[in-house]
Image (tube, rainbow, N blue to C red):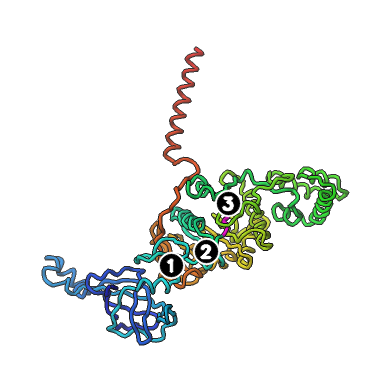
């Protein structure tokens, strides 16, 4: 039975087709963000409580309150509790009417009349209203309701996803919950492959989980290899700064070497490329800068004669996850080149249907697709923006996780049709989110700053209306790379003390 919450009232501005207010019944269990329903001549009107205010006529005049409170509390003179009331402001979302076994949504063209009763939203109707599905990805539950938040996978991922929050707000936890759901997804519901760009080693722990470990493959950044045969002049030019005058010569040398590889079945290395360029009859003004670029490529230690790691054709499988753990790399340039290569390779393989539909999740995406910075220093930005624009046509979905939305490429972020927002307090980031995420108004933007860990707002393609979610607990055990800070501190002091004692013993033995 749905609880009675209150009664629609008439104010100077409401009720309208966009908003209405209602006075709460005594002890009414209404909370901000809760979905409610009322009636109009058209049918059931759905809305959510955007704000709650409390009022009391006895406390309206400050000077009167101050005067009474000098002697004794005002409550000893007047029945103040009898005049206290609360008003909830409701933002109207739409109306629902039943047609056969289904509910049909439409716009509201007539507001509810003053005096109409407001009740709790019907849970079955609410699921249909916000767009939850029985076989969807379970994030948790709808805040203030006992309704499971099961999101349709296609609507969530196909047109790309952005997870935005400040550090420590729960981005990695939310991502892990989503990945668990994708790993658990049955074949008959449709499964995607997952490729994770892991910057801090937060997802490598999945490999040790007894339930999910068999579905996880982890590749460390230092083990990534690009076979020489895959190199092109365009690829090299995007990774290192090849001067324009040297690009034609580089293309010519690579074409000759690949022809020899094919005909003579020989394998070449980056060292052979340097030797060929040194032997080529070209002016020193072209050869010198070109060689410096190839030396820069060699110093990245990525190019091998024949070895390829990861082998994306073999390692990208439906319902399984490939983690590229880049936490062992210090060189940011090398990380960017790896991300550029893997993302480009995934795009090419998927466009030829040589791998299954894939979800590429990029942690700290603002580092790989920055809003500012020269393109020659960000080879990964170009391909990430390309996937954001064109990936959905080929079944390559992009997920971007970032704690600095204002620094993330506007081109990429604007193509993410679903946003999951956790706590953000930086004013510049908030403004950027409000401008880039459809469905976020100023009231909801203010709510983002007060979200607790484990709470999120989802807006965009995945849901019909913005919803507040309570994220469920992880099924998998969180295994962080490295030891907790307090353990590292204890170990350091113990090892330092041990070293001092050993030095004293050696000195005594010497004396």
How far across and down, in percent of the image, does residue 166 sit? 46, 57
Q: Residue at x 71, y 52 (%)?
A: 240
Give the Cα separation between the discs numbered 1 and 3.
35 Å
Residue at which label 2 appears: 189
Per the rendering, the mark at residue 445 is 1
- Helix, strand or loop at disc 2? helix
Front disc: 2 or 1: 2
Front disc: 3 or 2: 2
Give the Cα separation between the discs numbered 3 and 2.
21 Å
Give the Cα separation between the discs numbered 2 and 1.
35 Å
Q: Is residue 244 left or right of residue 344?
A: right
Residue at which label 3 appears: 322
CB atoms of marks 1 and 3 within 8 Å: no
Is residue 325 positioned above or below 142 on the image?
above
Q: Nearer the viewer, residue 351 or 164?
A: 351
For the question of whether residue 286 can be seen, the reply is no
Crowd band around label 1 with a 10 angstrom C-alpha radius: few (<14), some (14–19), many (20+): some
Q: Which residues are magenta?
A: 192-199
Residue 373 highlighted magenta (yes or no): no
Front disc: 1 or 3: 3
Q: Is residue 51 left or right of residue 437?
A: left
- Helix, strand or loop at disc 1? helix
How far across and down, in percent of the image, does residue 294 sit? 75, 47
Q: Quadrant of residue 368?
A: bottom right
């Amino acid at each position: 039975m749905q609880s009675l919450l209150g009664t629609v009232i008439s104010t100077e501005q409401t009720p309208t087709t966009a908003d209405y207010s209602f006075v709460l019944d005594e002890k009414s269990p209404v909370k901000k963000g809760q979905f409610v329903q009322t009636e109009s001549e058209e049918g059931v009107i759905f809305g959510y409580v955007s704000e709650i205010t409390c009022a009391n006529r006895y406390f309206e005049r400050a000077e009167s309150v101050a005067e009474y409170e000098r002697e004794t509390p005002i409550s000893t003179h007047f029945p103040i509790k009898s005049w206290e009331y609360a008003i909830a402001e409701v933002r109207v979302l739409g109306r629902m009417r039943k047609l056969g076994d289904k509910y049909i949504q439409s716009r509201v063209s007539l507001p509810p009349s003053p005096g109409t009763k407001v009740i709790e939203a019907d849970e079955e109707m609410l699921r249909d209203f916000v767009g939850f599905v029985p076989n969807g990805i379970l994030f948790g539950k709808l805040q203030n309701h006992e309704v499971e938040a099961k999101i349709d996978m296609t609507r969530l991922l196909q047109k790309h996803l952005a997870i935005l929050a400040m550090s420590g707000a729960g981005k990695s936890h939310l991502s892990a919950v989503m990945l668990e759901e994708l790993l658990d997804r049955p074949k008959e519901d449709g499964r995607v492959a997952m490729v994770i760009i892991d910057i801090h080693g937060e997802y490598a722990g999945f490999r040790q989980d007894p339930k999910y470990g068999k579905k996880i493959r982890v590749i460390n950044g230092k083990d990534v290899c690009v076979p020489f045969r895959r190199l092109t002049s365009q690829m090299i030019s995007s990774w290192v700064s090849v001067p324009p005058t040297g690009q034609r010569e580089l293309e010519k040398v690579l074409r000759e070497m690949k022809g020899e590889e094919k005909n003579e079945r020989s394998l070449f290395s980056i060292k052979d490329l340097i030797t060929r360029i040194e032997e080529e009859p070209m002016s020193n003004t072209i050869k010198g800068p070109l060689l410096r670029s190839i030396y820069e490529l060699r110093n990245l230690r990525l190019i091998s004669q024949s070895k390829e790691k990861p082998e994306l054709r073999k390692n990208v499988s439906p319902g399984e996850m490939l983690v590229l753990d880049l936490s062992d790399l210090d060189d940011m340039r090398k990380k960017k080149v790896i991300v550029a290569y893997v993302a480009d390779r995934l795009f090419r393989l998927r466009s030829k249907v040589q791998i299954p539909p894939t979800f590429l999740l990029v942690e700290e995406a603002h580092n790989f697709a920055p809003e500012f910075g020269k393109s020659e220093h960000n080879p990964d930005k170009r391909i990430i923006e390309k996937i954001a624009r064109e990936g959905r046509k080929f079944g390559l979905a992009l997920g971007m996780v970032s704690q600095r939305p204002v620094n993330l490429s506007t081109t990429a972020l604007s193509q993410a049709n679903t946003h999951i927002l956790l706590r953000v307090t930086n004013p510049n980031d908030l403004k950027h989110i409000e401008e880039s995420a459809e469905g976020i108004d100023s009231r909801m933007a203010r709510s983002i700053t007060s979200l607790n860990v484990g709470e999120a707002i989802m807006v965009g393609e995945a849901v019909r209306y913005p919803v507040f979610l309570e994220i469920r607990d992880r099924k998998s055990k969180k295994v962080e790379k490295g030891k907790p800070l307090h353990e590292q501190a204890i170990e350091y002091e113990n090892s330092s003390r041990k070293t001092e004692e050993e030095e004293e013993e050696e000195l005594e033995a010497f004396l």
